[in-house]
Image (cartoon, rainbow, N blue to C red):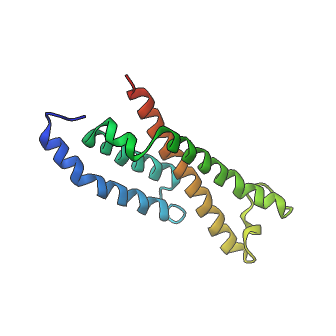
Amino acid sequence: MLKDFIVIKLILSFIIPYITLYAIYIQLNGEISPGGGFQAGVIFATGIIGYELVFGKEHFLRFISIKALLICSVMGVFLYAGTGVVSLIFSDNYLNYNSLQSNAIAGQHLGIFLIEIGVGLTVSSVMCLIYTLLRED
């Protein structure tokens, strides 16, 4: 926790909402612009880690527990894998998004969006888990 660094604490508390907003922007525009799930996940994790640095470990663990981070990482992997399994159910190749909707182009957009959400969720929660577990003293 940044006890003696008032300026850094003030700047971080001001910047964290913008970091989160930028991560959401990168996540939602990942399939049509550079970026996507991995970049958005790392940016979002940076905001969460900044939150922990500003408010302290105890407040952070009340806000997000290690169990919640594990659940989010598993949910992201299941979303990624589940998108591919849906394709297999419809007798298509794994991660062939054409079978997700009746229109092939709409299916491609939906499939890429779901994959990007799964990757972003997994990356952000795993990055926070790595930080949290390495920070434990």
Q: Residue furthest bottom?
A: 103
- Rendering quarter of residue 132: top left
In this view, which residue lies farthest toward the top? 137
User: Where on the picture, by quarter, is residue 110?
Assistant: bottom right
Q: Position of residue 116 (x, y in %)?
A: 57, 57
Q: Residue at x 35, y 42 (%)?
A: 60
For the point 21% across and 54% down, the residue is 14
Q: Residue at x 50, y 56 (%)?
A: 36
Q: Is residue 119 left or right of residue 55?
A: right
Quadrant, the N terminus: top left
Horizontal side of 59 relative to 119 (left or right) equals left
Give the residue displayed 44% in from the left and 59% down from the top.
Answer: 26
Q: Position of residue 66 (x, y in %)?
A: 48, 38
Q: Left or right: where does residue 115 sit relative to residue 67?
A: right
Please give left or right for residue 53 compared with residue 127 in the image. left
In front: 70, or 35? 70
Numbered-mark total: 0
Q: State which quarter of the image contains the C terminus.
A: top left
In x, y percent, where is residue 16? 29, 52
Instruction: From the top left corner, tell me how far across and down residue 23 is, in percent.
Output: 41, 56
3 or 33: which is nearer to us?
Answer: 3
